[in-house]
Amino acid sequence: MKFAHVINPVKVPADSELGIAQPITFETIRRAKEFAAPLAIEVFAVGYDEDQAVIPAFIQRLPLLHRSVLDLKKFTRPKKYPLLADVLQSLYEHSDADYLLFTNMDIALQPQFYVAVSQIVGGGYDAVIINRRGISKKYKRIDELPMMYSEFGQPHPGFDCFVFKRELFPKLLLKNICLGVSFSEVALVHNFIAFAERLKLVDELHLTFHIGTEVMPPLDPEYYQHNRQEYEQNIYPEIKDRLRIEKFPYSELSFYKRVMKWMLNPSFRTYQVIDLEGKSTARKWKYRFDTLRFRWLDKIR
């Protein structure tokens, strides 16, 4: 199997949260790629011209992005967020990998990450979501990586690491969802649920980590609203008929536990999963009733 991993580096002040996290992310990717030397791993970066200087030499550069969310509408606080579809399209067009990977720029990898991913997808999954663990915010330097690797941290409910088969990409409906804002993960997760044959959530392994344990960072209301509207008005209506509650992460848990997981996870819309849960229950009762009905009919001779 061949893997292609894309990231979207951004030139930011060195003392900002991302400015601290990004060099650490780069180094953990380099080490994980080195650790996985026998595997075919390609790492790509895609972004704008002004961000190219921060990309390390070991990462391959994809063609520059030429549009952003600012080309779609006006915002009072202009921020050049790229479109998720453009980032993944570039990876798809410039790689022939069997599996495509995308992670946020503040997500660091454990050294065994790529090797573990290859073993996970070897189980026959065409889409995998990997949950991160949050570690202390005291870490700020690359030379502290041994301690970062060693800190077990805390689980995080959201999703920010995605692995999927190449053949899945043309089916994804991502519309004008932009990166850097909530709901990008909502769009990807629900597309996986709709179109993947076998989806796996990995939330019990320590494969990625994030400096800081914050669950919901501050939101820019304008961009959040843009992504939310894109999902709820332009994506969800097109994929909702393909969504089955049985394919949702946590669906194997008891009713109480799975509903609580869905309600507490920022990547799921509570009213949508409750609606799907009700439809699933109705289908089950209809199946039972039809089974009994046909048994009774069979007895009438």
Image: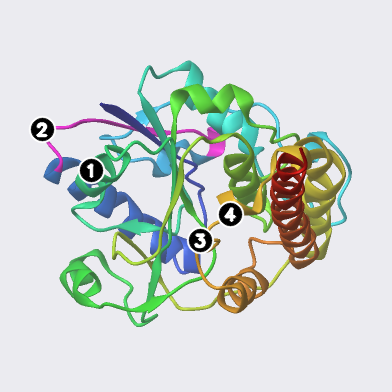
Type of amino acid under label 3? Pro
> Which is more N-terminal, label 3 or label 1?
3
- Asked if residue 193 lies left or right of residue 280, the reply is left
* Residue 135, x across and y down, in percent: 36, 77
- Asked if residue 126 lies left or right of residue 243, the reply is left
The numbered mark at residue 248 is 4
- The residue that mark 2 highlights is 38
Type of amino acid under label 1? Gln
Magenta stretch bounds: 36-50
- The residue that mark 1 highlights is 119
Alpha carbons under labels 3 and 4: distance apart: 39 Å
Is 93 in front, or is 99? Answer: 99
Question: Among all residues in the image, which is located at the extreme front?
Answer: 301
Disc 3 vs disc 2: which is toward the camera? Answer: 2
Q: Secondary structure at mark 2?
A: loop
- Residue 31 shows up from this direction: yes
> Which is more N-terminal, label 2 or label 3?
3
Disc 1 vs disc 3: which is toward the camera? Answer: 1
Q: Residue at x 61, y 73 (%)?
A: 255
